[in-house]
Image (cartoon, rainbow, N blue to C red):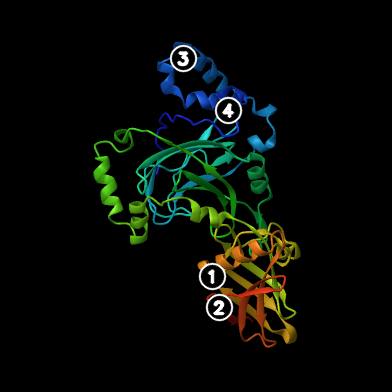
């Protein structure tokens, strides 16, 4: 679907900016371009806009560092918290050269935590790492509009794109290709960088502000009250209860984003030969960043901050030539989350161990979470074992 013409998006003040004039010149251009409605009120700004737009058209890319200019095959996709529908009214990633590329908007979203089924073709599929995100959306569960303008960790995004991932099957380096934007109750925006079918990396969690916005501009000739009522009538009972009791918040998703210092360990002397894992924060690891598999496995074998896992596939080699796949899909969310929270509170700052207890012949396995002398069995998270050639 071709990108729609950009409408005027009134940016909220960035959390890290004292005012618009503190921005670099190229970002200042974007700020005024997206604030065009206010120009009709202040003639001085109309003249200023003329000079700024002229300057924006002549950005000196040669004077900019590579992390602001180097281009990659990169697009964007929208999503919403599962079961909490929203419609993005307008959104775009802004680049340091004064350009931008859209996050598809105008679609009814009822899922997409860390993923998206919606995409647009843009004029130029090659884009530099963006420096900021602008977004406005409507939340049906809250009957509210939200808007935000957020600075992004541009150099980190660039480094991830530049480094890429190692594709063992193709024996070559590949890279990420999509920025996913998901909106969550409470005005929360979460951004990931993903490679389709493989890795997902959390870029950040951002807080938008509630705004008053004309529903007629959002959905012309549609009655707001009726539209909201019809949508809410189709929601799950638990979501309807949250609406009725005014208890909708971002708490659940913020808990999913939390990281704990944990490591993986086995009761038998097993060697990892491959691995992939998904997490509650929607991150996923399927490909290493380089052919160095030993360094890749240290992601799990050494304690480091990681979210709570949702699923995994561990390929192991044991004694006597035994090769197995240990698969957990899914971990029981409530049991696993409770175990992490309990032990993290009881042993603050100490690493937790997700322990795989298996027999010598690798015919069965159970899970537990351990810290110090404490051991919490994860009886609802079943381990499936498969023989490997």
Up the image or down, 106 lies above or below 290; here it is above
**Pointer 1 local density, CA inside 10 Å: few below 14, some 14–19, many at least 20:** some
Which circle, 3 or 2, is nearer the viewer?
2
Name the residue tied to disc 3. 46
Tell me the distance, in whole angstroms, between the alpha carbons under discs 3 and 1.
Answer: 59 Å
Question: In the drawing, what numbered circle is on residue 379?
Answer: 2
Q: Could you tell me which residue is drawn at 54 percent across and 15 percent down?
A: 51
In the displayed structure image, the side of residue 294 where residue 175 appears, left or right: left
Q: Could you tell me which residue is drawn at 57 percent across and 63 percent down?
A: 278
* First-in-chain label (2 vs 1): 1
Secondary structure of the residue carrying tag 1 is helix
Tell me the distance, in whole angstroms, between the alpha carbons under discs 2 and 1.
Answer: 8 Å
Question: In the drawing, what numbered circle is on residue 1?
Answer: none
* First-in-chain label (4 vs 3): 4
Name the residue tied to disc 1. 335
**Pointer 4 local density, CA inside 10 Å: few below 14, some 14–19, many at least 20:** many
Q: Looking at the image, which is closer to me, 261 or 359? A: 261
**Residue 189 percent coordinates (x, y):** 50, 45
**Residue 50 percent coordinates (x, y):** 50, 15
Tell me the distance, in whole angstroms, between the alpha carbons under discs 4 and 1.
Answer: 46 Å
Which circle, 2 or 4, is nearer the viewer?
2
Secondary structure of the residue carrying tag 2 is loop
Name the residue tied to disc 4. 27
Camera sees residue 194: yes
Camera sees residue 310: no
**Pointer 3 local density, CA inside 10 Å: few below 14, some 14–19, many at least 20:** some
* First-in-chain label (2 vs 4): 4
Q: Tags 4 and 3 in contact by the CB under 8 Å rule?
A: no
């Amino acid at each position: 679907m071709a990108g729609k013409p950009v409408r005027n998006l009134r940016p909220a003040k960035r959390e890290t900016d004292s005012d618009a004039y503190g921005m670099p010149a190229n970002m200042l251009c974007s700020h005024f371009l997206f604030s065009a409605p206010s120009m009709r009120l202040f003639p001085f700004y109309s003249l200023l806009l003329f000079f700024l737009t002229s300057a924006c058209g002549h950005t000196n890319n040669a004077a900019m560092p590579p992390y602001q200019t180097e281009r990659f095959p990169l697009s964007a996709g929208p999503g919403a918290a599962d079961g909490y529908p929203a419609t993005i009214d307008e959104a775009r990633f802004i680049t340091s050269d004064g350009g931008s590329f859209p996050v598809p908007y105008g679609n009814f979203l009822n899922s997409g935590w860390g993923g998206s089924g919606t995409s647009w073709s843009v004029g130029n599929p090659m884009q530099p790492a963006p420096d900021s995100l602008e977004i406005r959306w409507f939340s049906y569960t809250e009957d509210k509009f939200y808007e935000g303008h957020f600075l992004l960790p541009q150099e980190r995004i660039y480094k991830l794109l530049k480094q890429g991932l190692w594709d063992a099957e193709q024996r070559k380096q590949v890279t990420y290709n999509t920025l996913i934007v998901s909106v969550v109750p409470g005005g929360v925006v979460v951004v990931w960088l993903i490679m389709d079918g493989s890795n997902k990396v959390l870029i950040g969690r951002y807080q938008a502000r509630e705004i008053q916005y004309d529903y007629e501009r959002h959905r012309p000739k549609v009655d707001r009250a009726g539209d909201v009522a019809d949508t809410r009538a189709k929601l799950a009972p638990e979501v309807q209860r949250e609406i009725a009791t005014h208890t909708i918040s971002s708490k659940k998703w913020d808990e999913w984003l939390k990281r704990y210092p944990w490591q993986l360990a086995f009761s038998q002397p097993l060697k990892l030969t491959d691995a992939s894992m998904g997490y509650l924060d929607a991150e996923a690891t399927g490909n290493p960043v380089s052919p160095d598999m030993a360094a890749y496995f240290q992601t799990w074998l050494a304690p480091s901050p990681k979210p709570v896992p949702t699923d995994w596939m561990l390929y192991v080699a044991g004694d006597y030539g035994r090769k197995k796949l240990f698969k957990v899909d899914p971990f029981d969310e409530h049991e696993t989350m409770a175990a992490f929270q309990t032990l993290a509170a009881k042993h603050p700052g100490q690493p937790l161990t997700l322990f795989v207890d298996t027999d010598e012949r690798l015919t069965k396995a159970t899970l537990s979470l351990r810290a110090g002398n404490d051991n919490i069995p994860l009886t609802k998270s079943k381990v499936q074992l498969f023989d490997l050639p």
